[in-house]
Image (cartoon, grey):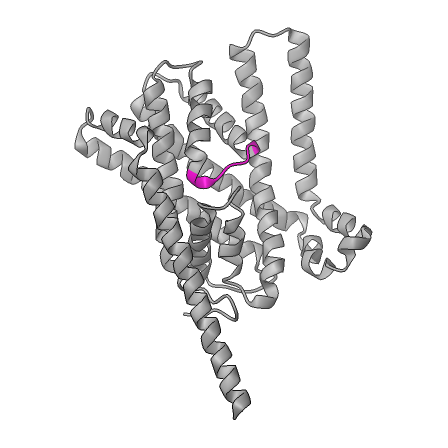
Amino acid sequence: MQIVNAKKLTSQYKKLLSYFIKTAIVVFAFWIIYNKLSDNENLSSFRSLLQQIPQSEIILVMTTVVVLMFLNWGLEALKWRRLISGIEKISVWRSIESVFCGLTWAVFTPNRIGEYGGRVFFLSPKRRIVGVVAMAVGNIGQMVLTNVFGAIALCLFIYKFVNIDYRLFYALVILSTMFCSFFIIFYFNIKWLNGILVSMRFTRKYKKFYSILARYQKKELLNILLFCLARYVVFSTQYFILFYWLIPELHYLDILMMVSILFFVQSTLPSLDLFDIGVRSVTASYFFSSITDQNVAVIACTASIWLINIIIPAILGTYFVFKLNFFGNIQRS
């Protein structure tokens, strides 16, 4: 009888602790989001620009960008479901819940590290660490495209706007080609990483967690990379729509080049999602100054994308935080 009561007490304690953690996460997320939004000059600049544009046009454009945001994270949910299909079968809706929950965790953790925790807690406890490895594979795929397109765009930018010796430029192109080739070869041979980890004595005992790397064949990796490419096209389109809308004199190829550089630079800098707007604004302002003098519009576009793609999903994800169970299987719906 005492054992039963002790188990019941332990179960109640875990539920109480779990609820406290989830509440703390949500309250903290809302608090820092509120503080960041309540005094954001970039978003104020965006509102000022919109005052000069017909309301019907604003509604059409912003609705399109928001719809693309849902498409972007919907594609990420499908990619996540595909990545863990060999680990645990989950529904499309469960995958969507885990992605948005992860976005809530990501806003207040360095380099979006909390996104891993937000997602894998939707898996069974025994599969959560393996889920982290699977998610890393998807992130590597996204990083490959960001680096490849970014390196190409950077070479084009230097060719068009930077006056350097042609021999130095050719050397830069060769280095960029080697850089891109390395990432592509590494990604499609991700199982090499498994072999490297197995060869090291201090990591060998954890091979049951990362052995999933050896399961990803080239065909599967290509399918995952196609999801990454679709996402890249979607969020590039969001930027293109806003920049072309607010600065119509820009050439569309220049916009795409600058956006690719923006993604590339952002991916190389350590940052916090909530304060990433500063990094985005400075980067966009610097590179776009080569093709336009409308700095306010550039920063405003960047700030609005940050709000739509990062902050709004993080707010929506707070609802799914309460569906987690840190100490056992989640409740399936």
The answer to whether residue 205 is visible is yes
Q: Residue 272 lies in magenta, yes or no?
A: yes
Q: Image point 17% across, 28% down: which residue?
A: 54
Q: Is residue 53 above or below residue 210?
A: above
Q: Image point 67% across, 14% down: which residue?
A: 170
Q: Residue 283 lies in magenta, yes or no?
A: no
Residue 243 horizontal/vertical position (percent): 35, 25
Residue 235 horizontal/vertical position (percent): 43, 37
Q: Is residue 109 above or below residue 120?
A: above
The answer to whether residue 317 is visible is no
Residue 290 horizontal/vertical position (percent): 44, 13
Q: Quadrant of the C terminus?
A: bottom left
Q: Image quarter for residue 241?
A: top left
Q: Image point 70% across, 27% down: which residue?
A: 178
Which residues fall within the magenta stretch? 268-274
Q: Nearer the viewer, residue 219 or 316?
A: 316
Residue 207 horizontal/vertical position (percent): 73, 58
Q: Is residue 217 left or right of residue 318?
A: right
Q: Image quarter for residue 251?
A: top left
